[in-house]
């Protein structure tokens, strides 16, 4: 339980006045009039008021201290986040393939709502791609036509309800471009496939890499460049491996595999960049098909089409994959756009160096006049210490006509040399990770360093603090953080975002923005194609991920819930009178934040359900139990049994899933705990019964209802007395089975009943189940009389 909040001094104004009045005879014997009309009594009341104000502040913690205490615990306020969306393009008939470069902005077209701009994050080749058929092979060699489900935007199992090796997704195209990249956007059902799950998976991978790093720090020689921090990539699926193939008619079966490359690269001919982690995360698959692709007929689709297929060649999935949207010509877009500014170049200025071309990057030095115009300009060749700046337009001055240059750089202010100088960025909120702040003074550039506070900054450190919501920048006082020099130009290069307002609805991003950035990026694109972009653009799904700056009470609440996660689990288990989370409603369990450490069995069970990139339906932990020695006590050993969310009668985790869960728990277990993660063992339960039906009841229907009821009751995922899955180690009681059959519609009573286990022997009584085992339904024999 939390520590009680102490009241350091509970005296009030009245108490202080009475206490002060009582001290008068002791310290001022000649003061005899203690009534309220006396001026001295007035002073006593005044000082009591001042003292009460000090006492009030004594019991208060300033917001700055709260932030520092939270940071000490590892919690900081979440900065404004830009929303993300997937844009898709449907080019008009007769349009040939054309390139859309990264950085092109599109915007919403609402009549009343403010315009929200999104910027594409990578190059895209737009071409006519007509998806006409979608077929699924669950691995048995039989194709199921799912085209109607896809056209009606109904969820469908992309590799069947029980994907196994050989399961294949077939995509048939009436029109498809060869030797050009084709981007297909996949969106799956459920929160465990969205961008947040992707981010959790990347963070856990990065944390594992840090854990495995050598404890000694990296030591570098003087003058040696420190290695750049490696960007953590999306890890592959822990079990499933999917290959992409195109039908070319060559080879024994006519299918040609595509070579897999990194998802961040663009594929060349015969390559594929799969960003979906084997079809488990929302993402884009970009393929570059060979010119030898050919049309063919497959399955129940009568038309000859160009076919692609995604085939499961190794491993298995934790749960079936449910596809909700598939769209060609797709690209990720972010609701964060660069800030630019135009600077006038005074007449008569002769710029030095090689003049830049719009759309390229350059390095420069400049001096500004009092009116803000450039009075000296030098373009610096590469290799000099100056930031690279993107040039959007440049017109040199000619004679008495001033020139102009537009840069993706904003003049924030001019240094005053005074401590604690404050400046404001012209556009806010700010995407924090994009901000670069520079001072330009005496022909030299210096880049600043953003910090959450300046408490640890030194005199020489050019540090600053940013309020991303308002765009305010605070510099140091000379002791903690360097003061910007007087008359130094202060520039900022950054992206601005609408934060939470960027979470726009589906179908609203449908217009090309008319900005100077787009004019430069699309300069090589013909005007008819630029005009077409506003007619063929949309977003099938709502934009998501945008968030405003987290308020301090929200940060405190997040910290409290995280630190009290262990107590919350104990409260939930006590409320439901259960010693395991396995027999608690999963919605209640998953609604609680997972603890940071596995202190007891409940913590380990909750953590096993929270492993990024996995689908675990059930988890149960036992202390002093080893799976290899179920009948012996093994002190210090904890066994965690997990059940994947597969739609089969006896789900078993793959070796990759077991390894992923164990790696996750190993980093969070207690130091001296030996951890074992295994799958369950199943006892197949078969029921043999003779049942008398009610008069007029249909025998076949009664028999089918009984079998269905028995299968549901013994289901390891949804069965059991409470419908939460059959409890681990719970015996099968004959009386419960009798009651179950008797409650089926059309049943009068049960004449005979026998329970059969794996040993094929009849059990006149109950079936015993080992502690770490589950039951699964077998082939029941029901006779209706």
Image: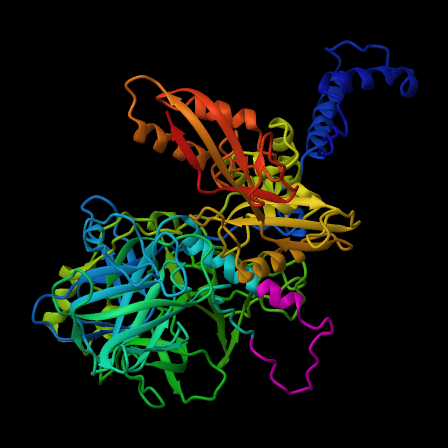
Residue 405 appears in the figure: no
Location of residue 158 with respect to 484 vertically, above or below: above
Horizontal and vertical percent for residue 86?
30, 59
Main secondary-structure element of the magenta-colored stretch: loop
Could you tell me which quadrant the N terminus lies in? top right
Outermost residue toward the left? 94
Residue 653 appears in the figure: yes
- Between residues 480 and 275, which one lies in front from this camera angle? 275
Q: How is the image coloured?
A: rainbow
Give the magenta-colored segment's residue range.
206-228
Q: Is residue 467 left or right of residue 143?
A: right
Location of residue 47 with respect to 348 vertically, above or below: above
Who's the residue at 25% across and 55% down the image?
539
Location of residue 772 with respect to 203 vertically, above or below: above
Who's the residue at 56% across and 45% down the image?
758
Location of residue 759 with respect to 57 vertically, above or below: below
- Between residues 246 and 665, which one lies in front from this camera angle? 246
Could you tell me which quadrant the C terminus lies in? top left
Horizontal and vertical percent for residue 633?
78, 47
Horizontal and vertical percent for residue 333?
32, 62
Q: Is residue 773 magenta-colored?
A: no
- Between residues 92 and 291, which one lies in front from this camera angle? 291
Who's the residue at 35% across and 21% down the image?
746
- Between residues 551 and 3, which one lies in front from this camera angle? 3
Q: Is residue 632 left or right of residue 30?
A: left
Number of marks in picture: 0
Q: Is residue 214 left or right of residue 693?
A: right
Q: Is residue 211 magenta-colored?
A: yes
Horizontal and vertical percent for residue 236?
47, 67
**Residue 216 picture quarter:** bottom right
**Residue 362 picture quarter:** bottom left
């Amino acid at each position: 339980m939390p520590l009680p909040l102490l009241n350091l001094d509970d005296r009030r104004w009245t108490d202080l006045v009475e206490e002060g009045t009582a001290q008068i005879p002791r310290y001022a014997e000649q003061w005899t009039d203690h009534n309220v009309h006396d001026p001295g009594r007035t002073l006593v009341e005044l000082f009591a008021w001042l003292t009460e104000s000090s006492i009030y502040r004594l019991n208060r913690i300033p917001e700055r201290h709260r932030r520092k205490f939270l940071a000490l615990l590892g919690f900081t306020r979440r900065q404004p986040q830009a929303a993300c969306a997937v844009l898709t393009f449907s080019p008009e008939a007769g349009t040939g393939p054309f390139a859309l470069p990264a950085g092109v902005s599109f915007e919403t077209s609402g009549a009343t709502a403010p315009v929200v701009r999104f910027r594409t994050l990578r190059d895209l080749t737009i071409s006519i791609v007509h998806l006409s058929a979608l077929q699924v092979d669950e691995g048995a060699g039989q194709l199921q036509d799912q085209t109607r489900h896809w056209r009606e935007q109904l969820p469908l199992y992309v590799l069947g309800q029980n994907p196994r090796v050989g399961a294949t997704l077939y995509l048939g195209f009436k029109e498809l471009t060869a030797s050009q990249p084709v981007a297909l956007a996949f969106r799956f059902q459920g929160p465990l496939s969205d961008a947040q799950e992707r981010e959790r998976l990347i963070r856990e991978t990065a944390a594992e890499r840090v854990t495995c790093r050598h404890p000694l720090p990296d030591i570098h020689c003087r003058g040696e460049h420190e290695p750049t921090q490696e960007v953590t990539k999306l890890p592959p699926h822990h079990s499933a491996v999917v290959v992409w193939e195109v039908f070319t008619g060559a080879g024994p079966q006519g299918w040609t595999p595509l070579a897999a490359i990194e998802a961040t690269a663009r594929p060349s001919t015969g390559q594929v960049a799969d960003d979906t982690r084997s079809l488990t995360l929302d993402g884009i698959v970009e393929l570059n098909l060979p010119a030898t692709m050919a049309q063919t007929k497959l399955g129940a689709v009568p038309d000859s089409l160009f076919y692609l297929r995604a085939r499961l060649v190794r491993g298995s999935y934790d749960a079936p994959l449910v596809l909700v949207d598939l769209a060609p010509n797709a690209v990720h877009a972010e609701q964060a756009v660069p800030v630019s500014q135009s600077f006038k170049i005074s007449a008569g200025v002769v710029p030095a160096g090689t003049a830049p071309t719009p759309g390229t990057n350059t390095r420069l030095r400049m001096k500004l006049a009092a009116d803000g115009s450039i009075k000296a300009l030098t373009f610096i060749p590469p290799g000099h210490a100056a930031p690279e700046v993107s040039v959007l337009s440049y017109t040199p001055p000619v004679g008495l006509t001033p020139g102009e240059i537009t840069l993706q750089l904003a003049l924030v202010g001019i240094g005053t040399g005074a401590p604690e100088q404050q400046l404001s960025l012209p556009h806010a909120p700010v995407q924090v990770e994009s901000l670069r702040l520079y001072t330009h003074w005496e022909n030299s550039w210096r880049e600043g360093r953003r910090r959450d506070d300046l408490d640890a900054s030194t005199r020489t450190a050019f540090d600053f603090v940013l309020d991303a919501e308002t765009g305010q920048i605070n510099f140091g006082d000379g002791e903690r953080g360097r003061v910007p020099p007087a008359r130094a130009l202060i520039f900022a290069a950054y992206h601005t975002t609408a934060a939470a307002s960027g979470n726009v609805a589906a179908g609203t991003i449908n217009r090309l923005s008319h900005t100077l950035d787009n004019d430069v990026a699309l300069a090589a694109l013909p005007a008819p194609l630029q005009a077409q972009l506003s007619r063929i653009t949309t977003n099938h799904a709502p934009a998501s991920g945008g968030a405003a700056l987290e308020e301090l009470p929200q940060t405190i609440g997040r910290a409290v819930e995280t630190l009290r996660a262990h107590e919350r689990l104990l409260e939930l288990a006590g409320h439901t009178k259960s010693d395991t989370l396995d027999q608690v409603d999963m919605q209640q369990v998953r609604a609680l934040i997972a603890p940071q450490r596995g202190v007891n069995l409940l913590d380990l069970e909750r953590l096993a359900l929270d492993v990024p990139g996995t689908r675990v339906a059930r988890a149960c932990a036992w202390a002093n139990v080893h799976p290899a020695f179920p009948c012996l006590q093994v002190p210090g050993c904890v066994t965690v049994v997990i059940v994947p969310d597969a739609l089969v009668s006896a789900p078993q985790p793959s070796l990759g899933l077991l390894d992923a869960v164990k790696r996750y728990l190993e980093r969070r277990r207690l130091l001296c705990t030996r951890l074992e993660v295994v799958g369950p063992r199943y006892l197949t339960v078969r029921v043999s019964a003779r049942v008398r039906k009610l008069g007029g009841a249909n025998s076949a229907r009664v028999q089918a209802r009984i079998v269905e009821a028995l299968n549901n009751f013994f289901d390891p995922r949804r069965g059991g007395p409470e419908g939460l899955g059959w409890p681990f180690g719970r015996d099968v009681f004959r009386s419960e089975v009798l009651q179950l059959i008797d409650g089926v519609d059309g049943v009068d009573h049960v004449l005979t009943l026998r329970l059969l286990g794996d040993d094929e022997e009849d059990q006149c009584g109950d079936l015993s189940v080992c502690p770490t085992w589950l039951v699964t339904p077998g082939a029941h024999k029901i006779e209706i009389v």
